[in-house]
Protein backbone atom coordinates (compact mmCIF):
# COMPACT_ATOMS: atom_id res chain seq x y z
CA UNK A 1 0.00 0.00 0.00
CA UNK A 2 1.41 3.37 -0.93
CA UNK A 3 1.40 6.47 1.26
CA UNK A 4 -1.36 8.23 -0.67
CA UNK A 5 -3.67 5.26 -0.23
CA UNK A 6 -2.94 5.05 3.49
CA UNK A 7 -3.74 8.76 3.82
CA UNK A 8 -6.96 8.20 1.89
CA UNK A 9 -7.92 5.48 4.38
CA UNK A 10 -7.19 7.88 7.25
CA UNK A 11 -9.39 10.57 5.70
CA UNK A 12 -12.22 8.05 5.27
CA UNK A 13 -11.87 7.01 8.91
CA UNK A 14 -12.04 10.67 9.94
CA UNK A 15 -15.57 10.79 8.54
CA UNK A 16 -16.59 8.24 11.21
CA UNK A 17 -15.45 10.47 14.12
CA UNK A 18 -17.78 10.71 17.09
CA UNK A 19 -17.14 14.29 18.13
CA UNK A 20 -20.44 15.99 18.96
CA UNK A 21 -18.85 18.34 21.48
CA UNK A 22 -15.64 19.48 19.86
CA UNK A 23 -16.48 18.87 16.20
CA UNK A 24 -12.78 18.05 15.98
CA UNK A 25 -12.43 15.05 13.72
CA UNK A 26 -9.38 12.88 13.28
CA UNK A 27 -8.83 9.65 11.38
CA UNK A 28 -5.94 7.21 11.43
CA UNK A 29 -4.93 4.27 9.27
CA UNK A 30 -2.36 1.84 10.64
CA UNK A 31 -0.40 -0.32 8.22
CA UNK A 32 0.68 -3.69 9.57
CA UNK A 33 3.73 -5.56 8.32
CA UNK A 34 1.49 -8.16 6.71
CA UNK A 35 -0.10 -5.44 4.56
CA UNK A 36 -3.35 -5.25 6.47
CA UNK A 37 -4.70 -1.84 7.50
CA UNK A 38 -6.71 -0.95 10.58
CA UNK A 39 -8.43 2.39 10.82
CA UNK A 40 -9.70 4.45 13.70
CA UNK A 41 -11.41 7.72 14.46
CA UNK A 42 -11.55 9.85 17.56
CA UNK A 43 -14.46 9.07 19.85
CA UNK A 44 -15.76 11.50 22.45
CA UNK A 45 -18.07 10.56 25.27
CA UNK A 46 -20.30 12.60 27.57
CA UNK A 47 -18.05 11.57 30.46
CA UNK A 48 -14.94 12.85 28.67
CA UNK A 49 -13.55 9.33 28.50
CA UNK A 50 -12.85 9.60 24.82
CA UNK A 51 -10.07 8.10 22.79
CA UNK A 52 -7.92 9.22 19.89
CA UNK A 53 -8.04 7.84 16.37
CA UNK A 54 -4.49 6.53 16.60
CA UNK A 55 -5.18 4.36 19.65
CA UNK A 56 -8.46 3.09 18.21
CA UNK A 57 -6.60 1.91 15.11
CA UNK A 58 -3.80 0.36 17.15
CA UNK A 59 -6.11 -1.37 19.61
CA UNK A 60 -8.24 -2.74 16.80
CA UNK A 61 -5.12 -4.19 15.18
CA UNK A 62 -3.82 -5.63 18.45
CA UNK A 63 -7.19 -7.16 19.23
CA UNK A 64 -7.09 -8.86 15.84
CA UNK A 65 -3.69 -10.38 16.57
CA UNK A 66 -1.39 -7.98 14.76
CA UNK A 67 1.86 -7.17 16.53
CA UNK A 68 4.10 -5.52 13.93
CA UNK A 69 3.40 -2.16 12.34
CA UNK A 70 5.19 -0.10 9.72
CA UNK A 71 3.28 3.16 9.30
CA UNK A 72 0.34 5.19 10.49
CA UNK A 73 -1.39 7.93 8.53
CA UNK A 74 -3.23 10.63 10.43
CA UNK A 75 -5.79 12.98 8.88
CA UNK A 76 -7.57 15.90 10.45
CA UNK A 77 -6.88 18.93 12.50
CA UNK A 78 -5.79 22.32 11.30
CA UNK A 79 -2.63 24.38 11.13
CA UNK A 80 -0.42 21.69 9.71
CA UNK A 81 -2.29 18.61 10.75
CA UNK A 82 -2.84 16.73 13.97
CA UNK A 83 0.28 15.13 15.44
CA UNK A 84 -0.29 12.36 17.97
CA UNK A 85 -0.98 13.46 21.55
CA UNK A 86 1.33 12.44 24.36
CA UNK A 87 -0.62 9.31 25.27
CA UNK A 88 -0.67 8.13 21.66
CA UNK A 89 3.04 8.85 21.23
CA UNK A 90 3.81 6.61 24.20
CA UNK A 91 1.56 3.76 23.08
CA UNK A 92 2.58 3.93 19.42
CA UNK A 93 6.23 3.87 20.42
CA UNK A 94 5.69 0.93 22.78
CA UNK A 95 4.24 -1.23 20.03
CA UNK A 96 6.11 0.19 17.04
CA UNK A 97 9.33 1.98 17.99
CA UNK A 98 10.33 2.60 14.37
CA UNK A 99 6.85 3.47 13.11
CA UNK A 100 6.58 5.94 10.22
CA UNK A 101 4.05 8.68 10.93
CA UNK A 102 2.39 10.24 7.90
CA UNK A 103 0.76 13.45 8.97
CA UNK A 104 -1.67 15.13 6.60
CA UNK A 105 -0.86 18.83 6.58
CA UNK A 106 -4.30 20.11 5.59
CA UNK A 107 -2.88 21.73 2.46
CA UNK A 108 -2.84 18.69 0.21
CA UNK A 109 0.48 17.34 1.41
CA UNK A 110 1.86 15.41 4.33
CA UNK A 111 4.94 15.07 6.47
CA UNK A 112 6.66 11.77 7.16
CA UNK A 113 8.66 11.28 10.32
CA UNK A 114 9.42 8.39 12.62
CA UNK A 115 7.61 8.12 15.94
CA UNK A 116 10.95 8.84 17.63
CA UNK A 117 10.81 12.35 16.16
CA UNK A 118 7.64 12.97 18.16
CA UNK A 119 8.75 10.89 21.13
CA UNK A 120 12.53 11.10 21.44
CA UNK A 121 12.98 10.00 25.05
CA UNK A 122 10.44 7.28 25.78
CA UNK A 123 9.64 5.88 29.14
CA UNK A 124 10.05 2.16 28.89
CA UNK A 125 10.10 -0.88 31.11
CA UNK A 126 13.89 -0.71 31.47
CA UNK A 127 13.32 2.37 33.64
CA UNK A 128 11.38 0.18 36.05
CA UNK A 129 13.56 -2.92 35.80
CA UNK A 130 17.07 -2.46 34.33
CA UNK A 131 17.26 -6.19 33.58
CA UNK A 132 14.41 -5.86 31.06
CA UNK A 133 14.98 -4.94 27.42
CA UNK A 134 14.80 -1.21 26.70
CA UNK A 135 11.70 -1.28 24.54
CA UNK A 136 8.16 -1.66 25.68
CA UNK A 137 7.18 -3.68 22.66
CA UNK A 138 4.87 -6.53 23.40
CA UNK A 139 5.47 -8.16 20.05
CA UNK A 140 7.17 -11.16 21.60
CA UNK A 141 4.44 -11.70 24.14
CA UNK A 142 1.84 -12.86 21.66
CA UNK A 143 0.15 -15.94 22.96
CA UNK A 144 -1.83 -18.50 21.07
ZN1 LIG B 1 -3.91 10.77 21.09
Image (cartoon, helix red, strand yellow):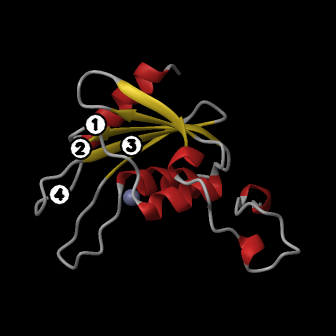
Image height check: is 71 above or below 136? above
Between discs 3 and 4, the one toward the N terminus: 4
Task: Please name the residue that numbered disc 3 is placed on.
Answer: 28
Q: Name the residue under label 1.
A: 80
Instruction: Label 2: state its secondary structure.
Output: loop
Which of the labelled discs sits on residue 102, or is there none? none
x then y, percent, for residue 142: 75, 59
**Disc 2 and disc 4 in contact, CB within 8 angstroms:** no
Earlier residue among tags 2 and 4: 4
Question: Is residue 143 shown to the viewer in this render?
Answer: no
Foreground disc of the pair 2, 4: 2
- Residue 139 lies, in percent from the top left, at 73, 55
Q: Nearer the viewer, mark 4 or mark 1?
A: 1
Q: Does the residue labelled 4 lie within 8 Å of ligand 1?
A: no
For the residue pair 5 and 111, the one nearer the viewer reads as: 111
Q: Earlier in the sequence, mark 2 or mark 3?
A: 3
Question: Quick check: which quadrant has ligand 1?
Answer: bottom left
Alpha carbons under labels 2 and 4: distance apart: 13 Å
Judge the density around disc 2: few (<14), some (14-19), many (≥20) Cα neighbours within 10 Å: some
Q: Is mark 1 on a helix, strand or loop?
A: loop
Amino acid sequence: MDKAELLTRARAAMEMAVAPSSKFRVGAALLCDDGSVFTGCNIESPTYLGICAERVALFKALSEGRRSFTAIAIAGGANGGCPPCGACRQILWEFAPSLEVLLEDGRGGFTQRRITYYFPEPFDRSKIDPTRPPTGRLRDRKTS
